[in-house]
Amino acid sequence: MKLIIAIVQDKDSNRLSSQFIEANVRATKLSTTGGFLRSGNTTFMIGIDDDRVNEVLEMIKKTSHAREQFMTPPVNLDVTMDGAAAYPVEVQVGGATVFVLPIEQFHQF
Ligand code: 2BA
């Protein structure tokens, strides 16, 4: 058994949840915040048998889209203002960031 941790954009999360339900994939959805953009994203925790890992990865891959997003760097008040204005920077986010971890034990009490 493996634990898949998948960080996806909020915009893709509902479609992915629906697909998991349809395919009988058990998942837990967490509201999370990206450390860089400091805006919301969604993290799925999916406990799944080894032989279904690739199927789940395919679903995540197909549903998660890369998008351009703008972030405004924080203004540093310690520096002189010449050239220090914070201009929005464009970053590409996603599709999805996925970790696959081995599970030592799985219990449901
Ligand atoms: P954020 O940390 O908000 O990052 C959003 C996007 O900003 C990233 O997209 C990346 O394109 C860019 N970015 C992140 N850190 C950067 C930096 N130091 N300098 C320049 N650009 C930077 P993704 O790579 O697709 O990541 C999407 C989200 O997945 C991240 O949101 C974070 O929540 C998560 N993530 C990505 N890599 C991770 C990792 N190694 N460990 C844990 N979470 C991760």
Image (cartoon, rainbow, N blue to C red):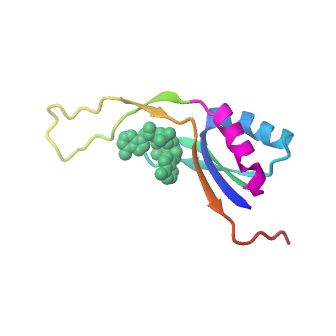
- What residue range appears in magenta? 47-65
Q: Compare residues 69 and 60 and report the one nearer the observer.
A: 60
Q: Quadrant of residue 87?
A: top left
Principal secondary structure, stretch drawn in magenta:
helix
Q: Compare residues 54 and 94 and report the one nearer the observer.
A: 54
Q: Indicate left or right for 76 with 94 as reference.
A: left
103 above or below 58? below
Q: Compare residues 16 and 78 and report the one nearer the observer.
A: 16
Q: Indicate left or right for 78 with 30 as reference.
A: left
Q: Position of residue 90 (x, y in %)?
A: 39, 29
100 above or below 68? below
Q: Position of residue 64 (x, y in %)?
A: 62, 34
Q: Indicate left or right for 89 with 77 as reference.
A: right
For the N terminus, the image quarter is: bottom right
> At 33% from the left edge and 41% from the top edge, which residue is drawn?
74
Residue that extends furthest to the front in the rendered view of this protein: 51
Residue 55 within the segment the image draws in magenta: yes
> At 80% from the left edge and 71% from the top edge, which residue is drawn?
107
> At 69% from the left edge and 66% from the top edge, which residue is drawn?
103
Residue 46 within the segment the image draws in magenta: no
For the C terminus, the image quarter is: bottom right
Q: Position of residue 14 (x, y in %)?
A: 73, 36
> At 23% from the left edge and 44% from the top edge, which residue is drawn?
77
